[in-house]
């Protein structure tokens, strides 16, 4: 078997359910340390983070490969065709939790980095690997904290390639050049509970909130930005009442999320929503969670290199997209870093029987190596 396949299998065998790294990073640090990388463990709370750097020329640019070793729970094990933490190859596919998201990419990063350091020991600038075990969870003590530490010590990152599964049908057919921001809210509207026959003695928080929610959900926030779609607000949960049909509830709770483009910041969206709610609701509180601001990488050296390399691998120029959810690149981009995302086909992530095509996995190290050569060789 190939080196990248062996390493991917070894990583899948580690039950690294977020935020537990389960020894993945130690395995990787041992390999990269032997290849001449300086490896630094950056643990925050219960989260392991690994920063491994190979220096060619201190005055040159820094290229970082960004990934995560944690995985989501497998769900009912009996629903899987094979044990989710026992890698299994069937029909040219490698099955296991994390095969596509993203232990395959992490293994490919490592194999490509070892080769690059060996073949280009005096390369331009620095090449580095940043891993966390807190991407699939709350994402508080992972790359978010590492970025704060980098900011405090003046760590420079010029380019970042995230190995999230981004391809659609063929390896390399999509280049992610940005992501929307994500802002979540827990809205609590308080009224006065009472009997439905005596509404004058109560105050219905549902009635107060309905016009506010109607305005929030019907508003066209913008018309999009560059390749970003328009900002969207989606209500995900509404809870009120005692279960009886003759009781006016005393409280309403609403969960909603905004996925937004660079027209907005989280602070501006929070202000807009609060102003709208205040027009309708007498007594309310709202708790915000900022998952990350949007980022967008303009055309430049990184995008050009990625476009050319992916065209070679996919046989046609890639689609350049800002779609999808969020990734840890949202914490690196504010450091002034140009970020792209390049990884395997996104078909089975977080699903039962997650898998990656063995042929794609074995090409991934060559893809990442070609990007390193183009940027730092």
Image (spheres, helix red, strand yellow):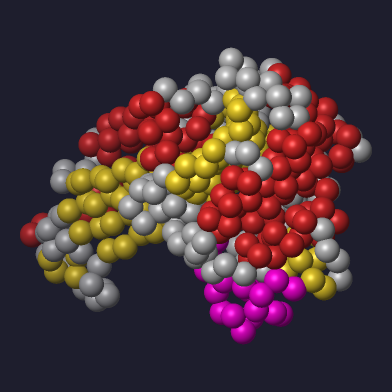
Q: Which residues are magenta?
A: 71-88
| In-front residue for pair 344/4 | 4
Residue 161 seen: yes
Residue 52 in the image: above or below residue 154: below
Which residue, as the protein is rendered here, is positioned at the far top?
59
* Left/right of residue 361 with respect to residue 288 in the rendered view: right
Give how far across and how far down residue 230 sits, in percent: 56, 33
| In-front residue for pair 343/253 | 343
Give the residue displayed 58% in from the left and 52% down from the top.
Answer: 30
Residue 219 seen: no
Residue 334 in the image: above or below residue 4: above
Give the residue displayed 83% in from the left and 28% down from the top.
Answer: 308
Give the residue displayed 80% in from the left and 66% down from the top.
Answer: 93
As for residue 81 lying within the magenta part, the answer is yes
Give the residue displayed 52% in from the left and 42% down from the top.
Answer: 39
Q: Main secondary structure of the magenta part?
A: loop
* Left/right of residue 182 with respect to residue 37 in the rendered view: left
Which quarter of the rendered picture does the N terminus lie within? bottom right
Give how far across and how far down residue 115 sits, in percent: 76, 41
């Amino acid at each position: 078997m190939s080196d990248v396949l062996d390493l991917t299998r070894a990583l899948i065998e580690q039950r690294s359910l977020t935020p537990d790294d389960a020894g993945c990073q130690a395995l990787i640090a041992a390999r990269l340390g032997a290849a001449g990388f300086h490896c630094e463990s950056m643990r925050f709370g219960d989260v392991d983070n690994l920063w491994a750097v190979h220096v060619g020329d201190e005055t040159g640019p820094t290229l970082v490969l960004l990934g995560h070793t944690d995985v989501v729970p497998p769900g009912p094990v009996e629903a899987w065709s094979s044990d989710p933490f026992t890698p299994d190859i069937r029909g040219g596919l490698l099955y296991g939790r994390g095969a596509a998201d993203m232990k395959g990419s992490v293994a490919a990063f490592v194999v490509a980095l070892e080769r690059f350091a060996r073949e280009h020991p005096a390369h331009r600038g620095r090449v580095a690997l940043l891993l966390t075990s807190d991407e699939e969870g709350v994402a508080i003590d992972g790359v978010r904290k590492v970025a704060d530490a980098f900011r405090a010590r003046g760590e420079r990152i010029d380019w970042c390639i995230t190995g999230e599964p981004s391809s659609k049908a063929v390896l390399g057919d999509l280049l992610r050049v940005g992501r929307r921001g994500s802002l979540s809210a827990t809205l609590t509207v308080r009224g006065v509970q009472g009997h439905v026959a005596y509404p004058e003695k109560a105050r219905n928080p549902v009635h107060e909130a309905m016009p506010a929610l109607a305005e929030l959900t019907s508003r066209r926030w913008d018309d999009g930005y560059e390749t970003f779609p328009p900002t969207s607000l989606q209500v995900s949960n509404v809870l009120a009442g005692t279960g009886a049909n003759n009781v006016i509830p005393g409280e309403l709770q609403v969960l909603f999320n905004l996925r937004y483009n660079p027209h907005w910041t989280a602070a501006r969206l929070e202000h807009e929503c609060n102003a709208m709610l205040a027009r309708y609701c007498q007594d309310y509180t709202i708790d915000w969670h900022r998952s990350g601001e949007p980022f967008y990488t303009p055309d430049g050296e990184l995008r050009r290199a990625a476009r050319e390399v992916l065209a070679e691998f996919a046989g046609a120029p890639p689609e350049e997209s800002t779609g999808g959810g969020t990734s840890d690149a949202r914490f690196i981009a504010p450091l002034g870093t140009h970020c792209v995302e390049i990884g395997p086909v996104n078909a089975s992530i977080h699903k039962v029987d997650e898998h990656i095509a063995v042929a794609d996995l074995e090409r991934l190290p060559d893809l990442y190596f070609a990007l390193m050569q183009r940027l730092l060789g």
